[in-house]
Amino acid sequence: MKAYLGCDIGRTRAENQDSIRAESYPDGVLAIVCDGMGGMENGSTASKLAIAAAEEHFQSAYHSGMSDEEICDLLRGSATVANQKVYRAAVSSRMRSRMGTTLVGAFVRQHTACIVNIGDSRAYLLPQEGELRQLTTDHTVVQLLYEQGMITAEERATHARRNELMRAVGVASRVLADIQTVPMKPGDKVLLCSDGLYNMVPPERIAEIMRQTPAEQVPEVCIAAANAGGGRDNISVILLTDEQMTDTEI
């Protein structure tokens, strides 16, 4: 598995509050996207603290040959450690500032992808044959309203409360992370992103880019499409694929 990364401030924000990371392991690749919130400085700090804490915890406990269940438990633990790190930083700050971040992470290997998410950063799967599928569920007010039948799928994109998170890393002492294991076949691709991508680029266009663009160029092309659509937020993209490495791999 190879990882290709891209992160951009977008066209309207004064600071990039997203943080992204990818690291190769003997039998897979760990990738994480965090989208900070709570004001410019606080959001940036939260995402950096969370991604560093999650990666450090994963690395410290990982060993080759772990089962899918063990990897999922490790991802859950990494998210828990990230939450504690950000929450304690917020509580101990002089202003006791409220800050937090989303987190979506994946450990992808030959046959499976183990996914963790908190908030509204997303993981998608594009099979070798088939349609793009959103793997994660957004932890937002509008998603809950949609699931309760109170708004339509179309109304989610324009609803007044579309930016309100129901779960985030660091805003409370404990947070529930969603965990799942997804079967992988040769040629399947996993894409992690912040909402700066999918709020600007429809899923059909994301799928088209993933299918028609060389793997190493997918993040760049996705970011360009988001900026062309308005670039109203920071944009982060990580593509995980078994395509062969090129000289432009990150």
Image (cartoon, rainbow, N blue to C red):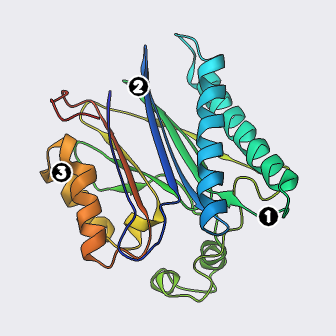
Secondary structure at badge 2 equals loop
Q: Earlier in the sequence, mark 2 or mark 1?
A: 1
Instruction: Assess disc 1: are there few (<14), some (14-19) or many (≥20) residues with their C-alpha within 10 Å of its C-alpha.
Output: some
Secondary structure at badge 3 equals helix
Secondary structure at badge 1 equals loop
| Residue 229 image position (x, y, % from top left) | 28, 77
Q: Earlier in the sequence, mark 1 or mark 3?
A: 1
| Residue 212 image position (x, y, % from top left) | 13, 52
Which residue in the protein does label 2 denote? 109
Distance CA(mark 3)–CA(mark 2)? 20 Å
Q: Residue at x 43, y 64 (%)?
A: 234
Q: Quadrant of the N terminus?
A: top left
Distance CA(mark 2)–CA(mark 1)? 38 Å
Seen from the viewer's position, the closer of residues 173 and 10 is 10
Q: Residue at x 65, y 44 (%)?
A: 49
Q: Residue at x 36, y 24 (%)?
A: 110
Q: Nearer the viewer, mark 2 or mark 1?
A: 1
Q: Earlier in the sequence, mark 3 or mark 2?
A: 2
11 lies above or below 182:
below
Task: Check disc 1 and give the amino acid type.
Answer: Ser
Occupied quadrant, residue 226? bottom left
- Residue 211's disc number: 3
Which residue in the protein does label 1 denote? 97
Occupied quadrant, residue 151? bottom right
